[in-house]
Amino acid sequence: MPRIRKYIETARFYRVGLFVVGLFLVVQAGYSEPVDSGPADSEKPLVVGVFPRKGFTVAMQTFAPLADYLAEKLNRPVKLESAPDFAAFWKGVEKRRYDLVHFNQYYYARAHNSHSYDVIAKNEEHGRSTMAGVIVVRRESDINSLEDLRGRKILFGGGRMAMQSYIVTSYLLRQAGLQPGDYREEFARSPANALLAAYFGMVPAAGSADANIHLSVVTNTVDISEFRILAIGEQLSHLPWAVKKEMPEPLRKHITEIFLGMAETRRGRAVLKQADLTGLLPARDDEYDAHRKIINAVLGEKY
């Protein structure tokens, strides 16, 4: 009996020992073979959204070199996106598709308020960091004042979400005593298209921005000296670039440094030129408070 008891105790010892060893190996296996959680952030494409101020095709062409430049400097893939029109672009913003976005000022104010985007930079075009809404006619037009537009057609570029081309120009019309219904509103797909339509006599007047007159898609097509500015708004901070609020601070800082340093190198200046830019400058959220006041006056929206 003592001998049998000894064998039983020995067997129990080995069973316990094997269980402990097995448990150890399972735990070790759990640590040595972690579950793949997908690609690291540096391997995921940085999605850059550009609103179609120049039209979809031109926006993609002119900003493609900038996207390539960012990819090289960040050492990660960069995916450039735009949309056929302003409304379709805004749907992308609502879905938060874009990590880095080139907005118009209306979209920025709205996206900052509702979708957590923060401005990091703004455009400089032709050495200017501001732009103004304008109502434009042909030089030989018989329209000499905003009052002369009563009952006439005005083509606004980009739709009702166009900051300068619709919101600011509507503000100018209100200040001149013209209310909705006193003139006929029509909309072009982009601010540049509105200018071209006015140039070719398709409409009596166009709402756009003074900076848009100098876009290459316009200057390469028509003689801009044939435009006459009928009314112009105040100079406001230029078009902003913004990032998602949750973007890691090192990445946000790196993108900002790349943007602000582009005008300091020959290659950077060449990339900027292809995008109709002379620089990218620092920007703060409060620079867009003046835009917010005009948005509220025209659309009744508070951002």
Image (cartoon, helix red, strand yellow):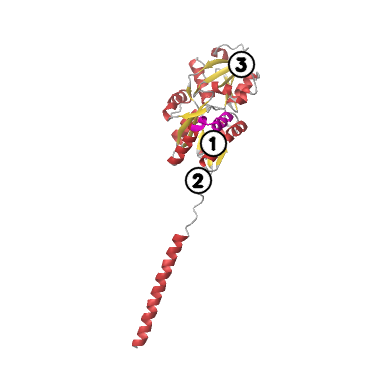
> Gap in Å between the C-alphas at discs 1 and 2?
18 Å
Point out the frontmost of discs 1 and 3: 3
Q: Tell me the tag on residue 49.
A: 1
Q: Look at mark 2 in the image and give the residue it sits on.
A: 42
Cβ atoms under marks 2 and 3 closer than 8 Å: no
Measure how far apart labels 1 and 3 are at the Cα level: 32 Å
Going from N to C along the chain, the mark reached first, 2 or 3, is 2
For the record, the magenta segment spans 261-274
Secondary structure at badge 2 equals: helix
Residue 171 at x, y = what percent?
49, 20
> In this view of the protein, which residue sits in the foreground, 120 or 268?
268
> Residue type at mark 2?
Ser
Q: Counting residues from the N terminus, which is met first, the one under dot 1 or under dot 3? A: 1
Numbered disc in front, either 2 or 3: 2
Q: Is residue 45 above or below residue 302?
A: below
Residue 25 lies, with reference to residue 295, above or below; the image says below
Question: Whole-Å distance between the Cαs marked 2 and 3?
Answer: 48 Å
Left or right: residue 120 compared with residue 268: left
**Mark 1 neighbour class, 10 Å CA radius: few under 14, some 14 to 19, many 20 or more:** many
Residue 225: assigned label: 3
Q: Residue at x 48, y 20 (%)?
A: 235
Q: Does the rendering let one see residue 244?
A: no
The amino acid at mark 3 is Ser
Q: Is residue 248 magenta?
A: no
What secondary structure predominates along the stretch shown in magenta? helix
Residue located farthest toward the bottom when viewing the structure as drawn = 1
